[in-house]
Image: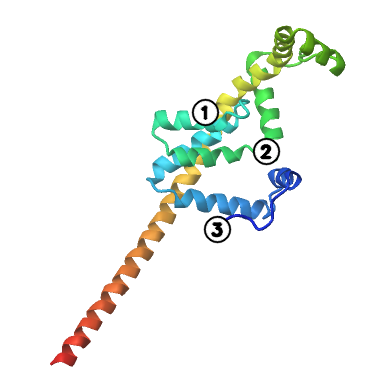
Amino acid sequence: MILKRREAVGWIKKVRNFFWPEIGFHRAAKYMTHKVNRISGSPHAIALGFATGTFASFTPLIGFHFIVAALIAWVIGGNLLASAIGTSVGNPLTFPFIWFVTHNTGSFLLGLEGREEVSIAAPDAGIRLMLSHPAHFFSELWTGLEPVFFPMCVGSIPLGLASGIVAYLLVKPAVAKYKQRRRRQRERRLAELRKRRSSSSASQQGAST
């Protein structure tokens, strides 16, 4: 393959790049911005799609952010590719903060602040229970996770909506400005090409006469 790496990337390096990009977070952010600007579509649809990805990143549905963002974008007319890129708002650096604020916000809205929430069983007891009674194990697991998961779901709605609105307001003018600049550059190149062609045809006519 032409674009295949010369050396295979090991799983350790893949994990390290996931938590700390090899090109650096600043260049990674610039690359993401460049990808968003290059998407075909109206600035409104692109910004709307990116906003849905931002909203999905605040939900505790880890592993399903792409699906959630795509479904919402499809319903409200956002760009699907932009929605996938927008989920990068949720990453190993931002997830701890997102989980903290969504859980605290949800607990506040539900009036659960100050309550003891999760009881963690001993790991060996959990393994024995999973092997002997799988159904009961997953029931106990959900019982332990529900006090955390449900407040996070509730808290993710207002925080995700607010973050999505901010993302929309930032992305739409940026994409519009980028596309306008690209359009002017394309029109300038076409004008220069037409000018060269007209001068070339004029010189040819002068030489023939």
Instruction: Give the secondary structure at mark 1.
Output: helix
Determine whether, in the image, residue 56 is placed left or right of residue 131: left
Q: How is the image coloured?
A: rainbow
Identified at 70% across, 14% down, the residue is 147
Residue highlighted by disc 2: 94
Residue highlighted by disc 1: 68
**Residue 64's x, y, as percent?**
57, 28
Residue 150, above or below 101: above
Mark 1 belongs to which amino acid? Val
Mark 2 belongs to which amino acid? Thr
Characterize the local packing of mark 3: few (<14), some (14-19) or many (20 or more) Cα atoms within 10 angstroms: few
Identified at 85% across, 18% down, the residue is 123
In 3D space, how far apart are the residues under numbered discs 2 and 1 (Cα atoms)? 18 Å
Q: Quadrant of residue 98?
A: top right
Mark 2 or mark 3: name the one nearer the start of the chain.
3
Identified at 16% across, 87% down, the residue is 205
Tag in front: 2 or 1: 1
Determine whether, in the image, residue 184 is placed left or right of residue 175: left
Mark 3 belongs to which amino acid? Ile
Q: Nearer the viewer, residue 93 or 135?
A: 135
In 3D space, how far apart are the residues under numbered discs 2 and 3 (Cα atoms)? 35 Å
Determine whether, in the image, residue 76 is placed left or right of residue 116: left
Characterize the local packing of mark 2: few (<14), some (14-19) or many (20 or more) Cα atoms within 10 angstroms: few
Tag in front: 1 or 3: 3
What label sits on residue 2 in the rendered view? 3
